[in-house]
Image (cartoon, grey):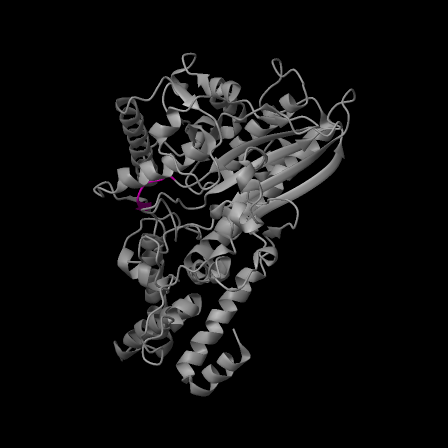
Amino acid sequence: VSEHAERQFQSNASKQEKRDQSIYLKMLKSVGKEKFFYFSFDYPMTLSAQRHALATSAASKLPAHARADESFFWNKPVLEPFLHHPKLKLDRWIVPVISGFVKVVKGIRVAADKDPVDFFFFTRRSWHRVGTRFNVRGVDKDGHCANFAETEMLVRKADGGLCSYVQVRGSIPLYWDQMVTLKYMPRTQYDAGNADNQVAFRAHFDKLIATYGHVTVLNLIDKHGTSANVRDESELGKAFETHAAEFNQRASRGGAANSVAVEAPALRQRHTADERLSETEAIDTRSSPLLANPIGYIWFDFHDECRKMQWGNLAKLMDMASDCFAKYDWFEVDTDGRVLKKQKGVFRVNCMDNLDRTNVVMSLVARRCVLLFLGIDTTSLEWLDSPFPAFESFFKNTWADNADAVSIMYAGTGALKTDFTRTGRRTIAGALQDGINSVTRYYLDNFAQGTHQDALDLFVGNVVSTNRRRTTDSPFTNQQQHSLVCLFVEVAVLVASVTGVSVSLHWSDDMTMRVRDGLVAAAVGLALLAYMMLTKGSFRSLGRQLVCKPALCLTSSRPEAK
C-alpha cells in the first residue's frame, strides 16, 4: 500500500471506515504473527520429495513459484498480481511460503548397529477452504476440504540416500457443518439432499488420486452409540461410505483396469480418476479388496474400540490396512539421485476435527515406515511401539509437537491425547491437560474463532470486495467483536429485570426478601436456560445470536452463518 494512498484514505474516510480499517489491519497482523509459516530459498517447501524428484525436466527449470504446489503456496493469493506482471520480472523475488509444521533433527541413531540419520518432518496445510474448527467443515464445490494437510517424514541416510513417506488428513468431503450455538458439542448437520455432494466428492478424490495414486480412507469417527451426536456422526460416516462406493462403481463402469497407477503427474497436470487408473505403472490389486478400487475405505470407531484405555486395539486398524501399507511402499533415492522406490498410494486419515485421533493413527503408520526405511525387520514388532528408546523419544515428541501445531491452527489449543503420543500411555497429567484444552476450545469456539476466521479469509483473499459505504454498513458489530462481554451484559440486564419485577410485587413483604426472591428466580431461570442450551442444544437460534460468528462475505462455499 503506497504512502500516498494511505494518506488519501485517512483524509477522506469516515470514522466508521477508519474503524473498519483498523480492524482489518489487526486481523492481518494477528495471522502474520503466527509462528507456523516457513519458507526456504533452496528447498521446494510446497512439494514432497517424490513430487520434486519426479518433476519433468521442463518443470524443474521453472522459477520456484511456478513449480510450487498451489494448494500449499500460502502467499500466492496476495502475490497474484505480481506472478505474471507484463513489465516487472519478479521471479527471483517470489518465495513460496507454507503454513504448517517443520522440524529438522540430525544425527539420530535408531539402533546400535545403524548409522546416524537425519530426520526432516513437514506438515503442509492447504490454504483452500482455510478456517477454524466449527466455522469451516466439509467440502466446497471445487473439492477442497477443511483442515486439509499433507504430512511427510523424510530421512537422509548416512550415505546421502533419501527416503520419504507421505500421508494426508482432511475433513469428510461432503456438505456438512457444526455451527456453534453455545452447546458444548454442536449437532452435526449433514446436507443429504444437496445434489452437489457427489460432484464435490468426486472433485476431491480426483485430485487426490491424480497427486498420490491409490487412496485408502481411514475414517475414525464414531459409529456405535445412542447419543444424538454419535447418531449424527454415524449418519455422516455412512454417507462417506456410500459416496466412496459410488465413486468406485463409477470408476469401474468407466473401464478402469484392475490396477492403480502410481506415476507422478507433471506439475499442474490434471487427470481424472479414470485417466489416472489407465496409466502404465501399477500395483497388483488382486491381493486385497481394498486395492481393487480407486478408494479403499476402512471405518474404525476409535472411541468405541479404544474406550477404557484399550489402546492396543489400534493394532486392529493397522492390521486391516496392512495390505495397502505393504503395497504402497515409500519413495527412495540413492546418493546419486536415482529413484529406487516410489510411493504408490496414500492414507487419507480423518476424524471429525482431523486433529487428535487422526494424529495418533498417522503416527503409527509413520513409525512403521521409518523403521522400514532403515532396513529393520518389523515382522515381530508391535505397531504402537519399537524397542529403540532413543528413536522412540524423538519420534513421539516430534509427532506430539506436530499434533499441537496443527491443533492450534485449527482449534486454537494444543492437541488432546498428546500424553499418549509422547509416552505411549495415558496419564493423569495428560487427562487434566485435555480437560483444560477442552474448556479453552469451548470458549474459543463460541467467543473468539469467528473473528479469527475473518482474519484467515482476509489473509488468503477470500473476502468479497463490495462498493457499499462502510459508514452505514460495517460488517463488524459490537456483538461480533465483543461477544463474551455482550453476553455478560445481557445476563446482567436479565437478572436486573427479574429482580425488578420481584421487587415491584408483594409490597407487603420485606425488601430484602423481595430482592432475594428475584435473584433466586433469575439464577434458577438462567441455570435452566444454560442447561437446555449447553447440553440439549435447545433455543438454537438464540444461541446462534450470542456467539461470535464470522462477519465477512466469502468467495468460498463455506456454509453461511444462520
Residue 12 visible to an observer of this rendering: yes
- For the point 35% across and 54% down, the residue is 556
Q: Nearer the viewer, residue 74 or 169?
A: 74
The answer to whether residue 425 is left or right of residue 547 is right
Residue 296 visible to an observer of this rendering: no
Q: Nearer the viewer, residue 149 or 342?
A: 342
- Across and down, in percent, residue 239 comes to 29, 34
The answer to whether residue 358 is left or right of residue 253 is right
Q: Is residue 365 magenta?
A: no
Q: Nearer the viewer, residue 500 or 558?
A: 558
The image quadrant that residue 330 belongs to is top right
- For the point 79% across and 22% down, the residue is 112
Q: Is residue 174 magenta?
A: yes
- Across and down, in percent, residue 76 comes to 49, 55
Q: Looking at the rendering, in which quadrant would you find the C terminus?
A: bottom left
- Across and down, in percent, residue 305 comes to 45, 26
The answer to whether residue 42 is left or right of residue 477 is right
In the rendered image, the vertical position of residue 179 relative to residue 279, given as above or below: below
**Magenta stretch: dominant SS?**
loop
From which residue to which does the magenta span run?
A: 172-176
In the rendered image, the vertical position of residue 113 relative to residue 434, given as above or below: above
Q: Nearer the viewer, residue 507 or 530?
A: 530
In the rendered image, the vertical position of residue 408 relative to residue 541, given as above or below: above
- Across and down, in percent, residue 368 comes to 60, 24
- For the point 61% across and 37% down, the residue is 399
The answer to whether residue 505 is left or right of residue 163 is left
Q: How many marks?
A: 0
